[in-house]
Amino acid sequence: MRASKEVKIKNSKFKTQKRKLKEIHISGAEGIYTKKEINSTVRSYIQRALSHSKGIADKIVVTIERLKQVPLSIKSLPVYTLCSSTPAEGERIVKEIAQSLVISKKSAEVALKVIKEGNMRGAAIISARKAERLEPDCERGVRVSLLGISKSALKRLSSELSKHRINTDTVKEAIILASKVASCNGILAELCVSDDPDYTTGYMASRKYGYIRIPNIKKEGSKIGGRAFFIEERLDVKEAIHYLEEIPVIITRVSPNKGIVTLNELLNYTHI
Ligand code: AMP
């Protein structure tokens, strides 16, 4: 599901009404479901699009397609939460994690800049060393699709997240997406800041460290958010995009939720 809304551009120099408007992304959701679940899922997606804190959507596009192949089965990333109280501290943490994943400072800065500019429907793909934008359409970005979780894994994930009171749809959906992204060959990490004004916890996810939650990465009330994937320089970007957008992946096994850790513990593996 993809929901958007047209808003007026402030101080637009264009005279025609059409040029004074721009479409902003309100909400999106993806999933793999059985035929029986389609009705209730579509209803809940529409409800979400019409009650989002970013505003009420005036266009909702729902696409339903039959899977053309059996989904690949993967394990969800382990979950960690860091203590961080300001956006500046959050950015420092992002840069430190990036550095330990051999992602250049420049690439981390480009990702933070893309996210602060906001209003992409998908994610930016940034080369890990030279900081080049590699997605074919920089306004749309790459949309991770065809991802889901089995019923038993969802139950297990909910119970893991409940231990630390973070069992919400937002967290579960983000973990599912981040786990698919981390399973993509050549993607070293993902940085995400939600564009939901009420949700200020971002994350940096990677196969190496798991799904790392960074509280207060943006100010409460800010509608700005986005996603960026850091990719190894030598990798075939087209192949990565094909995997992210077109290969169905389902989570059938769940890693634990390890609660609060320090950045030092996380980067030095002393928590394991
Ligand atoms: P959200 O976590 O839903 O608040 O989304 C934050 C940002 O992530 C959005 O503004 C989009 O730029 C991006 N995004 C949302 N859904 C996807 C997706 N399925 N694939 C890639 N990027 C996404």
Image (cartoon, rainbow, N blue to C red):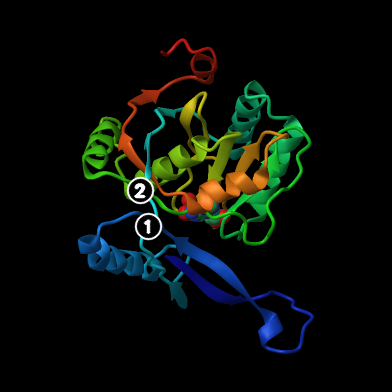
Q: CA distance from mark 2 to mark 1?
A: 7 Å
Mark 1, secondary structure of its residue: loop
Screen quadrant of the N terminus: bottom left
Q: Residue at x 53, y 20 (%)?
A: 263
Amino acid carrying label 2: it is Val
Q: Is any atom of residue 203 visible in this view? A: no
Left or right: 262, with 135 as reference point: left
Q: Which residue is mark 1?
A: 67
Q: Quadrant of residue 32?
A: bottom left
Amino acid carrying label 1: it is Leu
Screen quadrant of the C terminus: top left
Q: Residue furthest front?
A: 69
Residue 136 percent across, percent down from the top left: 69, 56
Marks 1 and 2: in contact by CB < 8 Å? yes
Left or right: 167, with 60 as reference point: left
Left or right: 29, with 10 as reference point: left
Mark 2, secondary structure of its residue: loop
Left or right: 9, with 170 as reference point: right
Q: Which residue is mark 2?
A: 70
Residue 246 percent across, percent down from the top left: 49, 53
Q: Is any atom of residue 23 visible in this view? A: yes
The one nearer the camera, 16 or 70, is 70
**Above or below: residue 270 compared with residue 199:** above
Q: Residue at x 59, y 39 (%)?
A: 87
The one nearer the camera, 221 or 46, is 46
Q: Residue at x 35, y 64 (%)?
A: 48
Residue 43 percent across, percent down from the top left: 28, 69
Q: Residue at x 27, y 44 (%)?
A: 150
